[in-house]
Image: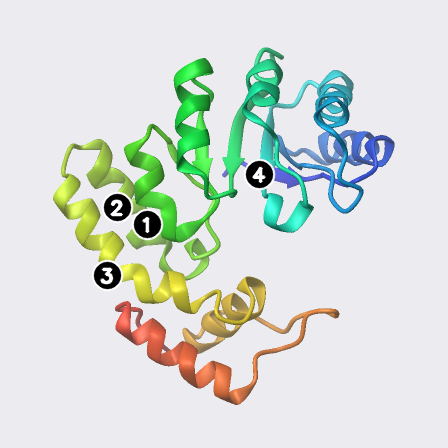
């Protein structure tokens, strides 16, 4: 199994430090999120990723999720950063298929969907896979969908996607990590509890989640 270390932070020197620690710990690669909260301009985002890339030999997957960070990695910035030898992929969770399609066409960067309900649409514009939240609960089904797509069986891929829509939507009705843990517990898996500031799902939320999982064909424990 290959492991990517989530070493990203909104402060560049600390991100570099975490990248080095990850390499020392044996990580196979790094998942580096856009600096969050301080909303740097594109020049700062580019300098941030370049600093991390120059500090390690590990391959880097950039993580673009403006809904959480407050700023996106613009297409021109992605294209320039992909010229660096160890920036090798992009986890795209900004939900802008037009922008992602443009980036893939311009530079061919391997893109991984970071938004489960858009996994199949992302494949249709040239994405190569997913970094999935719902993979914790329906990982085998997502692999089957991916395999069907690349085997040319688009009808089967669509069938699986549509069946899983209740899971995709249900997992994020409260918050992804909260309901993923609750879902794993319902499946008899070691989901465990959350850490503050997240809080565990309420009984009502769990009841709704149970219905969503069953609607998506998930076998519960």
Mark number for residue 145? 2
Marks 4, 3: nearer the viewer = 3
Residue bearing the label numbered 4: 3
**Residue at the disc numbered 3:** 163
Q: Disc 2 and disc 4: Cα gap in Å?
A: 22 Å
Look at the numbered disc 1 and give the secondary structure of its residue: helix
Badge 2 element: helix
Residue at figure coordinates x 41%, y 51% from the top left: 116
Residue 123 location in percent, x, y?
Answer: 32, 35
Residue 189 placed where, x, y %?
A: 47, 70
Asked whether, in this view, residue 145 is left or right of residue 55, the answer is: left
Q: Quadrant of the C terminus?
A: bottom left
Question: Is the residue marked by circle 3 packed among few (<14), some (14-19), or many (20+) residues within 10 Å?
Answer: some
Mark 2–mark 1 CB contact (< 8 Å): yes
- Picture layout, residue 127 above or below residue 161: above
Label 4 SS = loop
- Upstream in sequence: badge 3 or badge 2: 2
Q: Is residue 138 above or below residue 99?
A: below
Whether residue 163 sits left or right of residue 23 in the image: it is left
Q: Circle 1: is it few (<14), some (14-19), or many (20+) Cα within 10 Å? A: many
Q: Dividing the picture into quarters, in which one does residue 216 lie?
A: bottom left
């Amino acid at each position: 199994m290959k492991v990517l270390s989530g070493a990203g932070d909104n402060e560049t020197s600390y991100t570099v430090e975490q990248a080095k620690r990850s390499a020392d710990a044996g990580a196979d690669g790094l998942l580096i999120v856009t600096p969050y909260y301080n909303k740097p301009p594109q020049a700062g985002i580019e300098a941030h990723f370049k600093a991390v890339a120059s500090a390690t030999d590990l391959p880097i997957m950039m993580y673009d999720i403006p809904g959480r960070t407050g700023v996106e990695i613009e297409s021109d910035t992605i294209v320039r950063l992909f010229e660096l030898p160890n920036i090798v992929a992009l986890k795209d969770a900004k939900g802008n298929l037009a922008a992602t399609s443009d980036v893939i066409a311009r530079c061919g960067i391997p893109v991984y969907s970071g938004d489960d309900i858009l996994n199949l649409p992302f494949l249709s514009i040239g994405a190569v896979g997913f970094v999935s939240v719902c993979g914790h609960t329906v990982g085998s089904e997502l692999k089957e969908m991916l395999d069907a797509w690349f085997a040319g069986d688009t009808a089967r891929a669509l069938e699986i996607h549509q069946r899983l829509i209740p899971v995709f939507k249900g997992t994020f009705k409260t918050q992804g990590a909260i309901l993923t843990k609750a879902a794993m517990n319902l499946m008899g898996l070691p989901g465990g509890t959350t850490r503050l500031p997240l809080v565990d799902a309420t009984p009502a939320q769990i009841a709704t989640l149970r219905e969503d999982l069953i609607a998506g064909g998930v076998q519960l424990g």
